[in-house]
Each structure stands twice: as structure tokens, then as C-alpha cells.
Amino acid sequence: MLSWLVNIFVNALLLIVIAGYFESFHLKGIGAAFVASLLLSMLNIFVKPFLILLTLPITILSLGLFLFVINAITLMITSSIMGESFQIDGFGTAILASIVLSFFHLLIQKAIIEPLQRND
């Protein structure tokens, strides 16, 4: 449970950073970032497995790179559910944001969170 909350916090911070660097990626505030992170987490639990299953052949053929497209789709779904408080202007921005989000989340996970968990 604690690791899930840490992941939501990290995703919210990364969404805020991404919104600061990309003009076509908009967040209304910190609260919207946390709600978007929570919603994105729920979509990753419930919707993403079905999307992966439906696109398994193309995911295998692309050696897993199609997962960035699936992540972009979940970001776009999150954006459409949240309405005005979280907006992504295009699918290209969503793909770029999913790549950045995945890369930095992995970096933070490996460089900060896992070493802290080993010391406990």
C-alpha cells in the first residue's frame, strides 16, 4: 500500500514537471496532478491489461515499444475524464509525455526508492 502511494506521489510530481516543460500539456494545479495520478493508476490497474491483451501481436512485433502508445492512450483517457483540469492537446504530446513519464519514473524508482527500501 505504501509503495502504491509513493508511486502516485512520484507520478503527480512528474506530471507537474511535464506540464511545466510542454506547452500542450496542461494541469490546473497540484490537486489536479494528484487526482490525475490516482486516476492514471486506476486505469493502469483495470484498463491497461485489456489494452495490452488486445494489442499483443503488435506489441511483440515492436519489441514492446507499442507499450508507449498504450501509456499514451491511458493518459488521453485520464485527460478526457478530468476535463478542464487536465488537458493534453494532441496524441503526439501524449506519446512524448508517456515516454518522459516512464523514463523518469524508472530512474526515480531505481535511483531513490529502491535504495531507500533496501535500507529499511
Image (cartoon, rainbow, N blue to C red):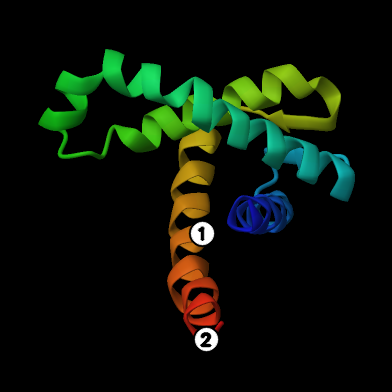
Residue 28 coordinates in the image, percent (x, y):
87, 40
Residue under label 2, please give it. Answer: 119
Residue 89 coordinates in the image, percent (x, y):
65, 28
Residue that protrudes farthest toward the left in the picture:
61
In this orientation, which residue lies closer to the viewer: 116 or 62? 116
In this orientation, which residue lies closer to the viewer: 78 or 48? 48
**Image height of 96 relative to 5, above or below:** above
The answer to whether residue 29 is seen in the rendering is: no
Dot label at residue 105? 1
For the residues labelled 1 and 2, the Cα–Cα distance comes to 20 Å
- Residue at the spot x=68%, y=26% of the render? 79
- Residue at the spot x=73%, y=36% of the render? 36
Front position among marks 1 and 2: 2
- The type of residue carrying mark 2 is Asn
Q: Is residue 56 left or right of residue 70?
A: left
Q: Is residue 80 left or right of residue 71?
A: right
Give yes or no for contact between labels 1 and 2 (Cβ–Cβ under 8 Å). Answer: no
**Image height of 53 relative to 32, above or below:** above
